Amino acid sequence: MERMVSRLVGTLVCVGLLALAGAAVASARTKLRGSAATQERLHSLLASGAVQPQESEDEHVPDNDEADEQGAYDFERTAPAQTVSGQALISAQQQAQGLGEQGQSWQLFTTQPYNAEPAGYNDPIQSNAGAGFGLVGGRITSLVQAPDGSWFAGAADGGVWRSRNQGQTWTAVFDSMPSLSIGALAVDPVDGSVWVGTGEANLSSDSYAGTGIYRSSNDGASWQRVGDNGSGTNPLVSTTVFKIIFDSAGDALAATDNGLFRLAAHSSSWTPVLEPAGPNDNPPYDQQVTSVAFVPGTNYRQVIAAIGWHGPGNTQYNGFYQSTNGGLSFSKVTTTPAGTIDPTDQGRTTFAYSADGTKLYAIVQSVSKLAAGDVTTLQGIFVSTGSPASVAGPWTLIGNEQKLEASGSALSADSGYGVGIQSWYNQDLAVDPSNPNHVYAGLEEVFESSDGGNTWNTASPYWNYGLACNPNCPNTTHPDQHAMMITDGKIVIGNDGGVYSRPLSDTGQYGDWTDLNSTLIDWQYYDARAGLLGRGNNSGVGVWGGLQDNGTSFDFTGAKQMIEPAGGDGFDVIVPPKNSATTMVGEYAYGLMYSTTDGGHTFDSYISPMCIGQEEEPGLPGGPRPDCDPNSRFQTPLAADPDNVNTWVSGGQYVWITRAGWNTTCTVSSCSWQKLYDTGDGNVSTAITSTKNGRVIYDAWVTNGNPGPTFNRGIATNYGGTWHQLDVSSLPDRYIAGVTVDQRDPARAWVVFNGYSRRWVPGGGVGHVFETDNGGRSWTDISGNLPDIASDALVELHGQLALATDGGAYTAPVGEGSRTRWQRLGTGLPNASLNNITIGPSGYLYVATHGRGVWRIPFGGRGGR
């Protein structure tokens, strides 16, 4: 649900207000803040010229020109290139294994279930009160059941989880692999082994890289990559995986973002079988195989597949394909009747056959509607019938935006956020094996038909706001559907909020769902900060954090549940070191900031200097201000000065400061934020830090063209008394993810570079951590023996540095210059990307992982082994 709205830019959800019937459209519009609806609102603002951001990082609603998505999660890691080989992750992990270790074991802090609707947290704008979500996890992309009855769930960047009791409890079984980004799960029918396709294929900006397909024959206890040939190469190492299927002999077909590949049983290598653009595809994505299926009743001789780049551009090979020789070769199919499925407008597609083969269902996304910014991107849900049903048709339209909306959807085309608006991101189908007419379709919501699509019910609405049953609606699920599985008499779904199920026999509208997320710890954090709950050192610790599509969370010592006081996408947070129980600042997309002084029960939302932040829901009355910042980033940097938690800095095109703390306001009549410096037209801040109560600030920025030849980055500072741009010609030509300043000596600062070196990114330069001791006049590469891995943030404590990367945490002493030698920091940390690292009470470090929650470790510069 969250995702639904927000990630247009990125994320999620629902913010919750009461959306009563009399104001259904207005309140639903507000609720969509964090999801797709937000997207549409942002698109309309852009179209009207009211705001002119230079990037759209929403993970879910791509810009028409994706090359303009500067600063988006994936491009931070590839710039200035467009893609990076997954082999970079494998190589980095191998390098890390050769380093020594220092420190103790990492401890998981976010161990409790995550309640998206905590009682008493009823802010009318920010909360999810009344949404009907229950407990939530992070984004689930795939589901499968093993022969022994175990369920496996694949998470977006949280690895693979196994349940032996139908989702009541889950255990992580993939934490040590080179990539925890999961695209597909499957079971080999010959030997019962579980296969995992890494690399999430949902096209969001934080759909992370994969490193191939892995197999486990021991219930997930160990994994081996399949398809490595004798030369050590594997064509799937650099792909994302949509689907894996098997024939009765154990031959596998893998649908990826760069073609369809076949692995014969007992073979040592993958062979491309549907690759119309060739092996050196440039530009990429024009042979993205989004679905593949065997035709029932043909002894696995007939195979169908769909190439479906969501567009625009790179769609020349889009269409339906068929094989009559078991998947060894394919030919393109002309669909009939003409005008039903428009082959010239076919984007991402998902197929599902009934068990008897008499019905073939398809969800088809529209390339043209996405390009036009329509209220939906859905071309339609279609069915082909026959014995067996043919991919050529004849096809019949059985579901479009209007029909599905009328089935009880919580979405509305009139609100600008219609059913299927994110059909390029949300797609799945499941057919009841005992009834070819009983079908489930996953878009933002779950739809169910018991008569082959003649009629539909909305089985899981986006939320419960505005529905006729409100306030007595049964539980719904989180929005944004990605996975479906029918087993044990249940329909099981995976979405941006985890795993849910309900009985197949429950075919009514708004069926009562059971959330299965109490032990699913796969939350995708962007930031997390810790502080004491009260002023006494023994008062306990509270941790606030911003998550993809799951709002801003609060967890604390002794809590029975983690809670979500604010919904939608959550990003950077500010937490007082001695009063985390009541006081926090968080943010939503494009710098919409909100603050609380009562622990999240209520929020003040009128505090943003950013134009889109001021335009976003609830909207600044009379705004935006004429002096607002036009170029804020989807994830806008926001930080408190370590010398004074009431001094905040933020950056868009401009550098901003407020010293009013929790009294900060920004309305038409007055604004506490002071505009300090213009980094340049088209530039936008990526990281910012300050010291000495804001008297010294360093601001890193990126400009248009990421990725691409016009990509540029820079650092502005007022060190020395006047604002100026630093000479960064000696630094890598990559995205600057972190800036840290020495509180004792502001002439000393460190910058952290994301992405990979020139080995993987031509022109990207070398090094990940650079230090200056003269305010940026010169820089020293202190990367030393660090693995070549995308790096995100750095802190200094007691003469020791701690660095967060996409492949673990590392530490080194301060002051070693080019001779710096790094060690792995701690043990037991899952191999999810670490999006931030911060210092908390009692000398603990906290890391925000993008897929495995928040972890901490004691850190003081001593110890080692």
Image (tube, grey):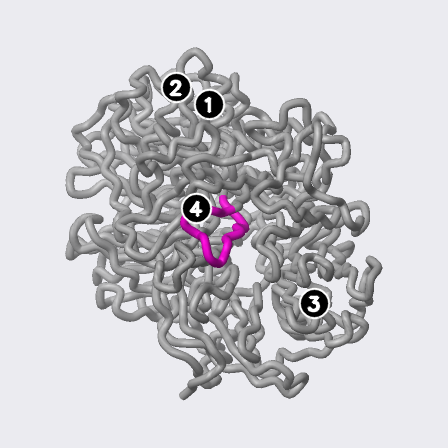
Binning the other alpha carbons within 10 Å of mark 2 as few (below 14), some (14 to 19) or many (20 upward) gives many
Report the residue at 61% width, 38% height from top: 607
User: Residue 69: where, in percent of width, then height?
Assistant: 65, 46
Q: Secondary structure at mark 3?
A: loop
Is residue 415 or residue 217 the one in the foreground? 415
User: Residue 678: where, in percent of width, then height?
Assistant: 80, 48
User: Residue 468: where, in percent of width, then height?
Assistant: 33, 15
Among the 4 quarters of the image, the one containing residue 269: bottom left
- Which residue type does callout 1 highlight? Ala
Q: Nearer the viewer, mark 4 or mark 2?
A: 4
Figure check: 608 above or below 218: above
Q: Secondary structure at mark 1?
A: helix
Residue 582 has which mark?
4
The range drawn in magenta is 570-584
**Residue holding disc 3:** 764
Outermost residue, front side: 536
Q: Nearer the viewer, mark 2 or mark 3?
A: 2
Circle 1/circle 2 CB separation < 8 Å: yes
Q: Nearer the viewer, mark 4 or mark 1?
A: 4
Circle 3/circle 1 CB separation < 8 Å: no
Left or right of 789? Residue 16 is left
Figure check: 234 above or below 124: below
Pointer 4 or 1: first along the chain: 1
Pointer 3 or 1: first along the chain: 1
Among the 4 quarters of the image, the one containing residue 697: bottom right
Q: Secondary structure at mark 4?
A: loop
Residue 362 in view:
no
**Residue holding disc 2:** 466
Left or right of 666? Residue 626 is right
Circle 4/circle 1 CB separation < 8 Å: no
> Alpha-carbon distance for marks 4 and 1?
29 Å
Figure check: 547 above or below 88: above
